[in-house]
Image (cartoon, rainbow, N blue to C red):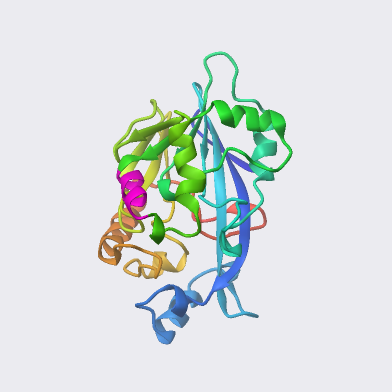
Amino acid sequence: MNQIKVGQVSVSSLVERDGPVRTALAMFPDATPERVARALAKLPGFTFDAATEMIVITYQSFILRTPTCTVLIDTCVGEHPGYPPTLSYDKTPWLKALEAKPPHRRGHRLRLLHPPAHRSCRLEHTAGRRQARAYLSQCQVHLLSEEYEHWKANESMAVGPSFNLCVAPIVEAGQALLVDDEFVLNDELSLIPAAGHSPGHVCVSLKSQGYHALFCGDMMHHAIQCIEPDWSTRLCSDPCRCRCNAPQFLLAILQDRHPVPSYSLPRSDGRARAR
């Protein structure tokens, strides 16, 4: 588990997957061999696996410990029946992290910020961490209302049996708080609209003591999009909106010098990249 500090908030990165996934041409419909080659030549070697000719993508969750609450930003992958191998990963790392530092001290609550509501975390984990599961069973799960309503009406479009398996039980148990895309959690954390990858996708903004970080989620999937920000992926529900989001996002980074934790930007040697 890798940790940085953003003002008063500690941010722990929990890598769930790190390695080659697919070729850039398969990932980005607008890519050409020539543009891919030029872009990769400008990026560090760890962003590309020459042996497989595939780009390297990292899936990572984040645990944020603020002065008032502990927040888990989940990547939307899990270890559930019916998921394809590319979305089925052991949740033991962040269960261990929660077990090591329990969030429920006085005035503290565990909150799960999960922007893509159609693949929320399942609470009945099989990792054998009873104490951590107990914390999760008491947490408040924040789901984007637009995402929730979309996937409730379009469950057949989701990857695997995700809505009925992972989202509906949380709502039925009364643990879900449906929020809009400008929701403010506390003095440090708020949401920023970034629809495109999915209908209600958001980024998470973290501000503390003059420092600012942005968790971009699935708005950007790979460092190659820093060179070609108008490339959206084949996984995006609205490519046109995605093409608008990334350039604006990068401009904000340049203007404010945000660190940029992401679900998918590559890492190497145990450190999240593109900070």
Q: Residue at x 70, y 37 (%)?
A: 96
Of helix, strand and loop, which mostly describes the magenta segment?
A: helix
Viewer-nearest residue: 140 or 257: 140
Q: Does residue 141 appear anywhere in the picture?
A: no
Q: Position of residue 94 (x, y in %)?
A: 64, 41
Residue 27 is one of the magenta-drawn residues:
no
Outermost residue to the right? 128
Write down the region rendered in magenta. Answer: 146-154
Q: Residue at x 55, y 52 (%)?
A: 77
Q: Residue 259, relative to residue 111: is it above or below?
A: below
Q: Position of residue 144 (x, y in %)?
A: 35, 41
| Quadrant of the snapshot with the N terminus | top right
Q: Residue at x 49, y 21 (%)?
A: 68
- Residue 133 shown left or right of residue 128 in the figure: left
Q: Quadrant of residue 55?
A: bottom right
Q: Quadrant of residue 20?
A: bottom right
Outermost residue to the top? 106
Q: Residue 31, relative to residue 199: is it above or below?
A: below
Q: Residue 210, relative to residue 221: is it above or below?
A: above
Residue 147 is one of the magenta-drawn residues:
yes
Viewer-nearest residue: 188 or 82: 82
Viewer-nearest residue: 196 or 77: 77
Q: Does residue 161 appear anywhere in the picture?
A: yes
Q: Position of residue 133 (x, y in %)?
A: 64, 32
Q: Position of residue 190 (x, y in %)?
A: 36, 35
Q: How many marks?
A: 0
